[in-house]
Image (cartoon, helix red, strand yellow):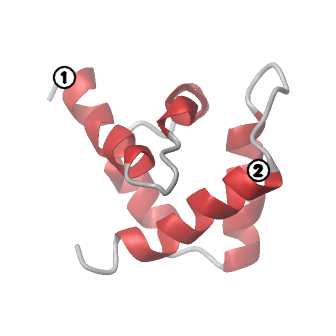
Amino acid sequence: ANKENETQGIRQFLRTCVPPMDGFLKHFLDFGCYNEGFLRGLSKWDPEEKAKLLKKILAGPEGKGATEMEIAVIQNHLGRYFMDK
């Protein structure tokens, strides 16, 4: 699969957050989280560990990171997204 197809799963996940969080796609890709498999694995992590890693990913390389609310939205969505998949 080419990179575009592979990253589609992450883009779709972020796009289906309410509100959509696909503005953070680059953060995930830069961190090395570039396919749905990584997200699926992360969704099964212990809540504290999951929160810690999401904060790290969403901080971004230049430190202009996500707000606490945006992190909460993504974390909540991560908890539900793979339940019915």
Q: CA distance from mark 1 to mark 2?
A: 28 Å
**Residue at mark 2:** 55
**Left-right relation of 28 to 14:** right
Placement of the C terminus among the 4 image quadrants: bottom left
Identify residue type, mark 2: Lys
The answer to whether residue 45 is above or below residue 36 is below
Residue at x 70% of width, y 55% of height: 71
Q: Secondary structure at mark 1?
A: loop
Residue at x 76% of width, y 74% of height: 48
Which one is in front in this view, the residue at disc 1 or the one at disc 2? 2
Question: Which residue of the protein is positioned furthest toward the front in this rendering?
Answer: 19
**Left-right relation of 21 to 1:** right
Placement of the N terminus among the 4 image quadrants: top left
The answer to whether residue 69 is above or below residue 29 is below
Q: Secondary structure at mark 2?
A: helix
Q: Residues within 10 Å of mark 1 (few under 14, many from 20)?
A: few
Q: Earlier in the sequence, mark 1 or mark 2?
A: 1
Q: Are the residues at dot 1 and dot 2 in contact (C-beta closer than 8 Å)?
A: no
Q: Residues within 10 Å of mark 2 (few under 14, many from 20)?
A: some
Question: Which residue of the protein is positioned furthest toward the right in this rendering?
Answer: 63
The quadrant holding residue 12 is top left
Percent position (x, y) of residue 60?
Answer: 73, 29
User: In front: 2, or 8?
Assistant: 8
Percent position (x, y) of residue 9?
Answer: 29, 45
The answer to whether residue 25 is above or below residue 74 is above
Residue at x 26% of width, y 34% of height: 6
Residue at x 53% of width, y 43% of height: 21
Percent position (x, y) of residue 62?
Answer: 81, 19
Q: How many marks?
A: 2
Percent position (x, y) of residue 43?
Answer: 49, 69
**Residue at mark 1:** 2
